[in-house]
Amino acid sequence: MELKDKLKVSVIGSGYVGLVTGVALAELGHSVICMDVDESKIAEIKKGNIPIYEPGLGELLLKNKAEGRLKFSSSLKEAVDHGLIIFIAVGTPPKSSGEADLSYVENVAREIAINMDSYRLIVEKSTVPVETGERVRQAMQLYIKGDIDFDVASNPEFLREGSAVDDFLHPDRIVIGVDSSKARDLLFCLYSPLAAPLIVTDIKSAELIKHASNSFLALKISFINAVSRISEMVGADVDKIAEGMGMDERIGKRFLNAGIGYGGSCFPKDVDAFIHMSEVLGYDFKLLKEVRKINEEQRQIVLKKIKEGLWILKDKKIVLWGASFKPGTDDLRGAPAIDIIEALLKEDAKVTVVDPQALDKLKDIFKDKISYEVDKYKAAKDADCILLTTEWDDFKDVDFKQLKDIMRLAFIVDGRNLYKHSELDSHGFLYLPFGSSAVGKPIGDKKVI
Ligand SMILES: NC(=O)c1ccc[n+]([C@@H]2O[C@H](COP(=O)([O-])OP(=O)(O)OC[C@H]3O[C@@H](n4cnc5c(N)ncnc54)[C@H](O)[C@@H]3O)[C@@H](O)[C@H]2O)c1
């Protein structure tokens, strides 16, 4: 096998990770089938309707489809027949115990085994607990017909929603967990067009790299949020503290942003799964339990801050600028906005949400219990409070004079520490950021929750 060889690849599960993986591998020149059990999703993708918002994905998908390198299917057999390398990219959602639900992974492994008639390399792309590779191998051995050789590998994905295509095509590193030279050579060949460092490990270490990485990033966020509480108590500025810390190369400045805490489909789930997995193995990962607790508390602190400004929330119009868990995506899984909206509704507040991409998905959750708006100024009319939840570009550029004239009360709670104290001060806002002094004078008791 030459490194320049183009390979046949199938990706099982065409969600945020599977679709990006399939499209990006086709862009590298490989021949790809993206498969999903959701027939309507595949039918829509075939028509050119992309089920998720991800910058650049639609254009690349259409290009590679038109050039004949990318196909879509809801037939697992077709995918297994096609791909020498088969990625498993199905969901691994959390159970109520925090344990990762591996039933989708097991189901796919079993179906691949049943449909395979010659060698295949099965690659875990989904985020899975350590030793899942071993379980996948055992499950396949149970169902495989005859004496067919296969390999299992782990190739965890580190893409970030909102910049997923770019991340996939320009990764910091590619982690390959293998236990055979054949599997290693196939994955080397697959990724040879990318100029990224390859880390080759055993399968268990690769699985652990993913959980350890996400948990470490979550830890950085909770750490700075803990510091932000102390900073607020003494009237210091957590953003300056983060800047000063981050200039130390050993620490680095990224993921030191104080605010409403982490969310999304990965960090909360992966921290839970890592805690659960450690417990099963006999280690009480107390450090990560505290990371999770600090993160949960940040959402209560948001409510506390709104109450500091308004005292009673009943019938107050509260506008959330942002719903998705971060800018650049329509993904609402684990989004802090969801918990905050639920808490506000419990207090009988009137909630309006502005978001450039996530409103359709939000409507599926809250129906007519809240109002939806695409224009940030229209939403702010007669509002008692704006809560910045997601730092979309549209919310970075604000005419505060206009905003003050529109709002009933000029009050902003800044869940992302986006705005400048001096600017809000000059326009006469009550401004409550995280981890630094308030601008203006809150009316409520600090102990209101
Ligand atoms: N979303 C991210 O940013 C991200 C980043 C890195 C890793 N991951 C991991 O990747 C995995 C997938 O995440 P996602 O966000 O893409 O999930 P997703 O829910 O968007 O997509 C999963 C897809 O798998 C499909 N599916 C389920 N069972 C199937 C089956 N038996 N056969 C074929 N398709 C099936 C579903 O219909 C769905 O379209 C998870 O383990 C996640 O933790 C996600």
Image (cartoon, grey):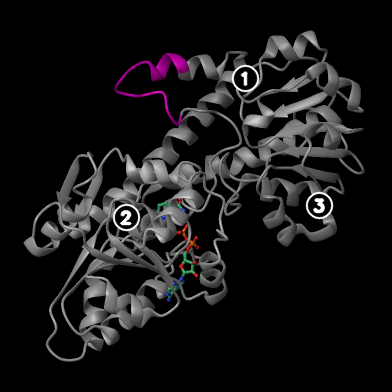
Q: Earlier in the sequence, mark 2 or mark 3?
A: 2
Q: Name the residue tied to disc 2.
A: 25
* Within-10-Å neighbours for mark 1: few <14, some 14–19, many 20+: few
Which numbered disc, 3 or 1, marks the residue closer to the eye? 3
Look at the numbered disc 2 and give the secondary structure of its residue: helix
Q: Assess whether residue 290 is covered by the magenta stretch.
A: no
| Amino acid at circle 2 | Leu
State the image coordinates of residue 270 (x, y, percent, origin top left): 42, 53
Q: Which residues are magenta?
A: 243-255
Predominant SS along the magenta part: loop
Judge by depth and name the residue closer to the eye, 430 or 359.
359
Amino acid on which the number 1 mark rests in the picture: Met
Query: Could you say whether the residue bearing mark 1 is in a helix, strand or loop?
Result: helix
Is disc 2 surrounded by few (<14), some (14 to 19) or many (20+) residues within 10 Å?
many
- In front: label 2 or label 1: 2
Horizontal side, residue 287 vs residue 411: left or right: left
Badge number at residue 139: none
In the rendered view, would you say 152 is above or below 221? below
Which quadrant holds residue 203?
Answer: bottom left
The one nearer the camera, 310 or 101, is 101
Which residue appears farthest toward the bottom when viewing the image? 146
Residue topped by disc 1: 233
**What is the total number of numbered labels drawn onto the structure image?**
3
Q: Amino acid at mark 3?
A: Lys
Q: Quadrant of ligand 1?
A: bottom left
Is residue 281 rendered to the left or right of residue 107? left
Q: Which residue is mark 3?
A: 346
Q: Residue at x 51, y 70 (%)?
A: 42
Would residue 346 be found to the left or right of residue 20 on screen?
Answer: right
- Mark pair 3, 1: CA separation: 28 Å
Measured as percent of width and height from the top left, residue 433 is found at 67, 24
Label pair 2/3, CB-CB below 8 angstroms: no
